[in-house]
Image (cartoon, rainbow, N blue to C red):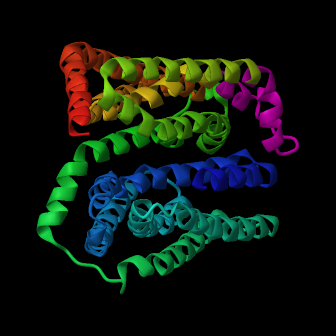
Amino acid sequence: MTSLITAVVVFLISKNLGASTLGDFITIITYISLFFLVVDFGLNAIAVKDLSTDEDKIPFYFRNLFGLRIILSIAIIFLSLVILSILPYRIEIKLTIALGSFLILFQGLFLSAIAVFQTKLRYEKMVLCDVFGSIVTLILIFLAIKTGANLLVLISIYLIGAILRVILGFYLVSSYVGKLSFEFNRRLLTYLMLSALPLGLTIFFAQLNASVDKIILSLINLPTSLNISNSVAVGVYGLGYKIFETAILFPTFFVNSSYPIMIKHRNESIEKFRKTLKKLVLVLVSVSLLGIILGFPLAPYLVNIFQKGGEDLSGSILILRILLLFLPIFYLSALFLWTAVTLGLTKILPLIYGFGSIINVSLNLIFIPKYGYISSAYVAGFTEFIILISLFYFTLEHLKKYEDKNLAFGKNLVFTQKESS
């Protein structure tokens, strides 16, 4: 729902306020989102896995997740503000980001409730909270933009929606955890943090890869030949990237729904797992190629939907088309990320995505001053290509190394089950 809200807000701002304001909005949202997902840190994945085998611990885990997320959110907000203080943004941008940083806290609180909903398989309650907060946010933002509100007001509305979502979430979760309170069990919190560390670092680096290009574009000197401001550059690039992001939502949902099947087939035999993986690759490659075929001719029409009368957003069309060329790479990297998780290769993931972040930042710092926002699209695709090659290499090596062992394990497991029956 967050992606949907942002897409609608991008449309409203671009259509009514223009590329420069859109660029400022994308800068603000991108900076906040850089820290936004860190508060997750993979803690829910560990908690849900534990609670699925012992639901009696739900109140205990919730209280500790609640407490941990408060401390973690405050620390992340403080860090974001310290970094913000040394960045050369205009004062109104800094004030808006400072206000928006409190979204990190409310995201953390809601994630604690999500852990309970996931454990109890009550996804409809999680969706209800998201839809409720999103509807309120969109209605208020639509009215605010139509009355000429500034970005500070828009971010304030985001906060209102986030607060309402948490209030409803905590009301619904109280039936499972009793009285709402928090605690700090050192042993549990240490276990959760250490267990979630590889996934948490991976989430951070993945978010960095998705955000750093726009952050650098908003700060660094652009080629004089472009004759545009940093805000407009971020607006033009960010619009093309936001449209592209809607195209890469499919592999996220597809792989997430396929993940339980991958685990099941992995436990049965490596051969069955390999066949499943090949089928998933075939589907994702086919859909991504279809996306390229349809996306190229549709790009001008898609960008035109967001265009304010009199403004030239042709640069967004080029950005979208460049990114579409890398669509199969983005689709397959989503698959091989969860393939690595399925095979228990979580410890290597932070190294892969961290290396990708180093490449991403370095190349953007080198090429943006020379070629502007066009280079960022190529860098984004190239970085994802490096990540995919790394994921593919380690996955393949793991399958080769343990194939005989895992096949034998699969046979023994089936034999044991037959014996026990």
Residue span colored magenta = 295-321
Is residue 415 in the magenta section?
no
Q: In the visual, does 391 lie left or right of 131?
A: left
Residue drawn at x 71%, y 66% is 141
Residue drawn at x 32%, y 28% is 268
Q: In the visual, does 300 lie left or right of 236?
A: right
Residue drawn at x 23%, y 78% is 183
Q: Residue furthest bottom?
A: 179
Q: Is residue 152 visible?
A: no
Q: Residue furthest right?
A: 309
Q: Is residue 11 above or below residue 270?
A: below
Is residue 299 in the magenta section?
yes
Image mark count? 0
Q: Is residue 336 above or below residue 206?
A: above
Q: Position of residue 21 (x, y in %)?
A: 68, 52
Q: Position of residue 301 (x, y in %)?
A: 83, 32
Q: Quadrant of residue 96?
A: bottom right
Q: Nearer the viewer, residue 413 or 237?
A: 413
Q: Position of residue 4 (x, y in %)?
A: 65, 52
